[in-house]
Amino acid sequence: MAERAALEELVRLQGERVRGLKQQKASAEQVRPRRQGRGQSKAEEDRAGVVCTEIEEEVAKLLKLKAQLGPDEGKQKFVLKTPKGTRDYSPRQMAVREKVFEVIISCFKRHGAEVIDTPVFELKETLTGKYGEDSKLIYDLKDQGGELLSLRYDLTVPFARYLAMNKLTNIKRYHIAKVYRRDNPAMTRGRYREFYQCDFDIAGQFDPMIPDAECLKIMCEILSSLQIGDFLVKVNDRRILDGMFAICGVPDSKFRTICSSVDKLDKVSWEEVKNEMVGEKGLAPEVADHIGDYVQQHGGVSLVKQLLQDPKLSQNKQALEGLGDLKLLFEYLTLFGIADKALEEKVRTTETQVLVASAQKKLLEERLKLVSELWDAGIKAELLYKKNPKLLNQLQYCEETGIPLVAIIGEQELKDGVIKLRSVASREEVDIRREDLVEEIKRRTNQPICIC
Amino acid sequence: MAERAALEELVRLQGERVRGLKQQKASAEQIEEEVAKLLKLKAQLGPDEGKQKFVLKTPKGTRDYSPRQMAVREKVFEVIISCFKRHGAEVIDTPVFELKETLTGKYGEDSKLIYDLKDQGGELLSLRYDLTVPFARYLAMNKLTNIKRYHIAKVYRRDNPAMTRGRYREFYQCDFDIAGQFDPMIPDAECLKIMCEILSSLQIGDFLVKVNDRRILDGMFAICGVPDSKFRTICSSVDKLDKVSWEEVKNEMVGEKGLAPEVADHIGDYVQQHGGVSLVKQLLQDPKLSQNKQALEGLGDLKLLFEYLTLFGIADKISFDLSLARGLDYYTGVIYEAVLLQSPAQAGEEPLGVGSVAAGGRYDGLVGMFDPKGRKVPCVGLSIGVERIFSIVEQRLEALEEKVRTTETQVLVASAQKKLLEERLKLVSELWDAGIKAELLYKKNPKLLNQLQYCEETGIPLVAIIGEQELKDGVIKLRSVASREEVDIRREDLVEEIKRRTNQPICIC
């Protein structure tokens, strides 16, 4: 073993000697490029000749040494890829990542969360039995004679282990780290085997629904601050679901599997879901229909109140508990100012994207010109039919009708050639050059999923 | 399979039914009935099931970071990162594991310390052992010929950890590297400058940076008569001189590694020397050493390095130490290691090193191992061993009794009487919307005293107290936790007042 290592060392040194000689030759040639036909000076020729013979000699030595190592050696294996489903972050990608984390972390901190970190792997036993069918996606480490280990699959089970290990009864914590799943990755669809999760959790016994409301507030703050477009937060309750299944006649044993069918409703039609429940999962058609009557409903707190009056549902204890908690939740969400983002497909009656407003008097002409430009560019825009409307009233109009953006014309801004673009949801304003305004509005109103 | 899942579901539901009855304190007979049903269901699942396994430890050699430890870590990283940025470095990140082939053959004897992933039918993978090999792979993969980058991430080594000595199997490295063909020793000098800036800013005490060069070591071994084939193994013996005596090292070289005693003595003459640039000049005159081409190259570069370090103002922190050998295979030129110094117990004694906190060197051949054409990209870099620094900083903070806050909350929204939850929710939401870091207790009717106590425990400096009378008057009572002074602030002025008070740089009220 030591001999082999020594031999490899000799090969390495000899290889360097050869490379060094080649480089010397190269730099000599660089300094004085060969001039064809004119010939070099005798000294230069001699030098070049000496180096050439030297190189040959040393290369021969090198090959002899390599031969001693054996036929398979000396061949470098060139592995120039990251493992399947993983990727490097270039400096540019790191810059984007930093911006996003900054927004997220500052929100978590604003809500008084502490931060923790856990090891990248856990004892295999810690993760066993926690992920159901997904357990087959866990990365195991090789048994190298010690503890059996697996890479973490999420941040929640480690959190639970941390709480139990430290006998903590309450904590508000965030944790940002990579997790590992042996998925079949489709990189273009943004699915990886190694990817970041940003978790925020509140552990502890508290008065009902206050922490739950804060979680939703945080979610809304983050998604607003990231400026990735309008969003909607869907809310439901496990007890309402279970209660609903019970009164519709779903057998206990089919609860989970029917649950996962219903969950697909955001991607496929009711018809398809019904077919799966009846055709594949053996549910009676009438039961499926009953479910259909319920699951296709969505709305705001009014729906909660309506269901509390539902003759069948209100007989079910679980559903009642869930509905009661949701009603309380909505009250808190209203106080937090986000009830319009929760559940409610805020039933808008118009699709207006931007209100053209003015910050001072005597700017009607400017508003008319700008709104016209926006219409010509295909943007859905409005203005108030007032010569000198107050800014506050214009902003209020947006809140009432759900218009997400305001293009504010001001005297100073006109001089500077910019328009102040304000996001109604986040209240953030930024000056946009007049000529860039259309593009900026289109960008903000059209982003479907991913950031920039 | 589906049956088992359904059975588990029934067990779960029945379990909940039982728990519910117990909570409601239903009749004993009812509870017994339902418990019997539960046991019957569980029995159907099989003998091993139904037992929750929750193993309450982290794997050997690893640990969680509590909020307190995270606060220390954040402080340390802030110093390090701001220094890297000040020197114009970009940042990258790489996956936690690499293809096993990528890491094979790069770490010499240390290869047995690599964590492998189980063969689960796909590519063979291993957890990264350091950040340097992934860096070389990144350079070759992207065909980069120059970059100045830093990378802060955890690495994995199946060491025998001694947690008390601060050695783990999972630990952070903070690497800074300059890749590219440049005029000699300027990037090398910048690396040393960065090392010194960071260690000074961290205020962890006096330190010393030892410098040597692979070529000087190799040249020295050659003229002492060490056989080529023993170079590496003798190197690793010499490397132990910072921890054990020369006698022990000589015994290992002669007794265990079969080196001739005279050769060992010759080595001893050299490796026990250390000094500044004067030692470099002295060795350049050494009759034997100056005959060796490699050693001459190394000495010449070190002389140039010292000139640059003097211009950088750090030459007094640098020691040319002939016993510095460093373990890793891939170094080709200058190598360096920073150690913290214990203050000498008596005047006149030399300060002792207590373990290295940073190290690095030049490695010109590594990227070429990844490039199909063997194209070389010369590199020089450094790695900060932050785990040791974390413990030192943590101890220092404890000694100073400086309270380490684990949150940044600026104000607690509190209520003085009952039935003011709505008002608290409204106010805290206003504060969040204005970007202020605020909290409230998750209780409908908390006692004021408990709310104040919460502030003391967590270090929240301000309390915004809502009271019935104050609501009528349109004011909020703003209280400073430290001074206990309270003042009524108009609701509309509250945000501004809080911002004004929390922007004071050093001390709050």
Image (tube, coloured by chain):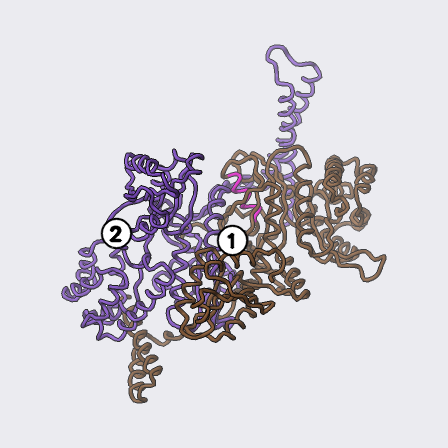
Chain colours: A purple, B brown
Specify whether A280 is left or right of B26: left
Looking at the picture, tell me which residue is in the foreground, B392 or A147.
B392
In the figure, residue A435 lies in which quadrant? top left
Q: Secondary structure at mark 2?
A: loop
The magenta segment is B131-140
Looking at the picture, tell me which residue is in the foreground, B254 or A87.
A87
Please give the name of the residue rendered at 74% of the width and 51% of the height, measured from the top-left corner. Answer: B208
Tag 1 residue: B127
**Residue flagged by tag 2: what amino acid is it?**
Arg
Specify whether A410 is left or right of B308: left
Image coordinates for residue A166, horizontal then vertical, percent: 52, 71
In the figure, residue B501 lies in which quadrant? bottom right
- The residue positioned farthest toward the left in the image shown: A286
Tag 2 residue: A348
Above or below, B48 relative to B365: below
- The residue positioned farthest toward the right in the image shown: B348
Q: Main secondary structure of the magenta part?
A: helix
A142 inside magenta stretch? no
Total marks drawn? 2
Question: The C terminus of chain A lies in which quarter of the figure?
Answer: top left
Q: Which mark is residue B449?
A: none
Image coordinates for residue B82, horizontal then vertical, percent: 60, 48
Looking at the picture, tell me which residue is in the foreground, B206 or B271.
B206
How far apart marks 2 and 1 lie (CA) works out to 52 Å
What chain does mark 2 sit on? A
